[in-house]
Amino acid sequence: MRLTTLFAACAMVATLGQGAFAQEMSFFRIGTGGTAGTYYPIGGLIANAISNPPGSRACEDGGSCGVPGLVATAVASNGSVGNVNAINGGAMEAGFSQSDVAYWAQTGTGLWEGQPAVDKLRLIANLYPESIHLVARADAGIETVADLAGKRVSLDEPGSGTLVDAKIILEAFGLSESDITPEYLKPDQAADRMRDGAMDAFFFVGGFPAGAIAELASQHDVRMIPITGPEVDTLLETYDFFATDSLPAGTYEGQDADVATISVGAQLVTSADQPEELIYGITKALYNENTQKLFAAGHAKGKQITLESATAGAGIPFHPGAERFYKEAGALR
């Protein structure tokens, strides 16, 4: 009896070996951000969506709709710059990046000025917008970007993407750092200074509602300053990584109307060295109907990961695999 059972078990293993485990398994690491941020949970959703380990149920049977044999993992990281460097060094196969950071890295400009360009950096998808906030004290006399002249303004920390974005916006409105009293603080530090009456305005780039701004608005009268006008129209023509955006009414306490602004994209990027068929399969999996439902149910920002926004504000070249999918889907010409 034992011998019969042993033979049966061996036969089952052999059958599995010919089926589920015969498929070659490959691994795909996605650099995200800190575990308390947005990149990490969204990265987890994406990793689940594009994975399809050997032995998984078929997509049409309610199983994985990912790339056959692929096991993707979301890896916590320091964010955009670290992810780009990890992709460039081969420590990650893909990662999240702000669209402006990706542009600077790929072109060797902005934050990458004086460093070797990451010329093999390629775009898989634009995921969702990260809005540029300009927050001002309600009594500071600031209604437009131009009104920042002569004011105390925090532009964020040296080396941050926000700092470079803020400088670009100031320049578009005919201002420079010498026209304001600049400070270089994190958003929460800038908010603290504003509470103390020692700061007139500050810039922040990120998804809304932003915790530091929401807390500030609940305690003090602040105003969200629109970033719009012909100056911004010119800016959008100059920099492909910017896109029009809006902070909906009610995003922050005391904000009674929509506020026009611009945004950079949270993007999924990879290396040109990744195989075309692999990236094609990953991109196709991202916009599968089942995957879209998973994104919408899994995170507030997941609802914004759509085929319609996938190619907006690209900034850097698409990976050939992603480009092929978007052309087939009618998202690119």
Image (cartoon, rainbow, N blue to C red):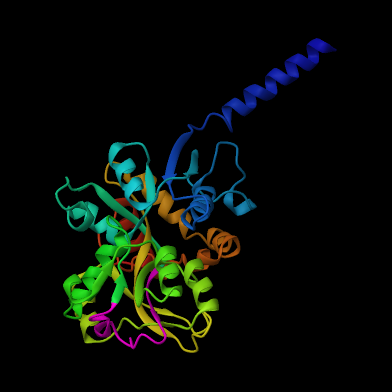
Above or below, 333 relative to 151: above
Residue at 73% across / 15% down in the picture? 7
Q: Position of residue 250 (x, y in %)?
A: 53, 83
Above or below, 15 relative to 47: above
Q: Position of residue 299 (x, y in %)?
A: 56, 62
Residue 128 visible here: no
Q: Please indicate whether residue 14 sits to the left or right of residue 176 in the image.
A: right
Q: Between residue 307 and residue 13, name the one nearer to us.
A: 307
Q: Position of residue 69 (x, y in %)?
A: 50, 38
Q: Position of residue 3 (x, y in %)?
A: 79, 10
Q: Assign the N terminus to one quadrant of the image.
A: top right
Residue 139 visible here: yes
136 is within the stretch colored magenta? yes
> Which region is colored magenta?
130-151
Residue at 36% across / 74% down in the picture? 199
Q: Assign the C terminus to one quadrant of the image.
A: bottom left
Residue at the left extreme of this rendering = 114
Residue at the top extreme of this rendering = 3
Residue at 18% across / 74% down in the picture? 171
